[in-house]
Image (spheres, rainbow, N blue to C red):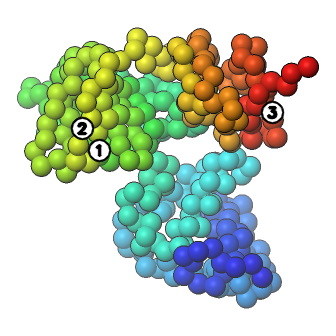
């Protein structure tokens, strides 16, 4: 019998834990019957223990406003063979078997993106217009919640990157417009700006107007960033501004623009728009990439690299791609 994954609270092999969650999702979607589940539970004591764990966690959450139900709904509405459903099952297995309490911590909640008011899939970009006329463009694999009230207009960036073009509030008493990330708040002044949420910091690009940054734990620290500037900020600090390049917002047009970018950095950016692993041999990591490339066909971009650089594109599978030095002779 294989060992349980580290941190599991009961002695259940990880493959059984995932299978138990698959049964739960299938029940939620009506794909299987309770009778079929009972047959599976009777096949091995590990099956029964895994299901008891799921029921125990669900009972503890009963009557509590929990996002678990929403996450399950998103998972069951996804096509059975899709990557999203597999990701949902994997994360829900962690929720049940690593410990729900740990996953209730805000920074460990990938389900927040599934349950978001607006979200995009990997490789997708989408523009929406909010109730006040503000235009919001979501980049690949991004998620936001929108919280408009009588006193403020707030957009919470849960993951990924957004471009915001603010509109003047139509209310008699104008409400402040606020973008919130894990590290702090942004308050724009008639502007167009992009916000990218990363694991340890947020990045702000200001294209028009100005944006005020207030780090979450900055002890009153406030800084105004002007058009043409980029900064990164953590929960308690703000970097010095650097100048934007004219093509830094090209992703909103479905393009990636490189001007002497290191190949390794270029591939890291391109990998945000495709599934799987995309990397390069360290020997060619420093090659420079220039040009304008379409984000809706990343395989075409890889082919273009092969025609402009001394490299080869090696596909172990569709989802495991390595760029290698070109073989000579």
Q: Which quarter of the figure is the C terminus placed in?
A: top right
Q: Which residue is mark 3?
A: 314
Instruction: Tell me: 147 left or right of 161.
Output: left
- Work out whether 305 lies above or below 325: above
Residue 68 in sight from this viewpoint: yes
Q: Which quarter of the figure is the N terminus placed in?
A: bottom right
- Label 1 with label 2: CB-CB less than 8 Å: yes
Residue 238: mark in rendering: 2
Q: Quadrant of residue 276?
A: top right
| Residue at 53% from the left image edge and 73% from the top image edge | 98
Tell me if mark 1 has few (under 14), some (14-19) or many (20+) residues whose alpha carbon lies within 10 angstroms of its own. many
Residue 234: mark in rendering: 1
Q: Secondary structure at mark 1?
A: loop
Q: Position of residue 131 (x, y in %)?
A: 30, 28
Residue 180 in sight from this viewpoint: no
Q: Earlier in the sequence, mark 3 or mark 2?
A: 2
- The count of marks equals 3
Q: Position of residue 307 (x, y in %)?
A: 76, 14
Tell me if mark 3 has few (under 14), some (14-19) or many (20+) residues whose alpha carbon lies within 10 angstroms of its own. few
Which residue appears farthest toward the right when viewing the image?
Answer: 329
Alpha carbon separation for disc pair 1 and 2:
6 Å
Q: Quadrant of residue 280?
A: top right
Alpha carbon separation for disc pair 3 and 1:
38 Å
Along the line of sight, the residue nearer the viewer: 182 or 55: 182
Instruction: Tell me: 31 left or right of 228.
Output: right
Q: Position of residue 35 (x, y in %)?
A: 75, 77
């Amino acid at each position: 019998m294989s060992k349980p994954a580290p941190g599991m609270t009961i002695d259940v092999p990880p493959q059984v834990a995932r299978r138990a969650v698959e049964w739960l999702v299938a029940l939620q979607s009506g794909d299987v019957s309770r009778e079929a589940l009972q047959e599976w539970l009777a096949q091995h004591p590990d099956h029964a223990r895994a299901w008891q764990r799921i029921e125990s966690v669900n009972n503890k959450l009963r009557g509590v406003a929990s996002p678990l139900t929403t996450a399950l709904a998103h998972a069951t509405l996804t096509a059975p063979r899709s990557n999203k459903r597999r990701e949902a099952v994997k994360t829900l297995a962690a929720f049940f078997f690593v410990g729900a309490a740990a996953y209730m911590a805000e920074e460990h909640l990938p389900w927040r993106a599934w349950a978001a008011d607006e979200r995009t899939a990997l490789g997708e970009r989408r523009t929406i217009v909010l109730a006040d006329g503000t235009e919001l463009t979501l980049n690949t694999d991004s998620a936001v919640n929108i919280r408009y009230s009588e006193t403020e207009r707030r957009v919470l960036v849960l993951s990924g990157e957004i471009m915001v073009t603010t509109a003047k509030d139509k209310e008699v008493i104008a409400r402040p417009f606020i973008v919130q990330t894990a590290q702090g708040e942004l308050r724009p002044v008639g502007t167009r700006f992009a916000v990218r949420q990363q694991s340890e910091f947020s990045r702000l690009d200001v294209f028009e107007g100005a944006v005020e940054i207030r780090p979450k734990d900055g002890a009153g620290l406030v800084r105004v960033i002007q058009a043409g500037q980029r900064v990164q900020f953590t929960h308690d600090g703000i970097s010095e501004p650097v100048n934007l390049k004219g093509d830094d917002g090209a992703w909103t047009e479905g393009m990636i623009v490189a001007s002497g970018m290191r190949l390794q950095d270029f591939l890291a950016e391109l990998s945000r728009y495709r599934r799987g692993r995309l990397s390069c041999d360290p020997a060619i990591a420093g090659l420079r990439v220039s040009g304008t490339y379409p984000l809706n066909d990343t395989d075409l971009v890889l082919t273009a690299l092969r025609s402009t650089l001394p490299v080869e594109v090696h596909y172990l599978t569709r989802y495991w791609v390595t760029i290698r030095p070109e073989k000579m002779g």
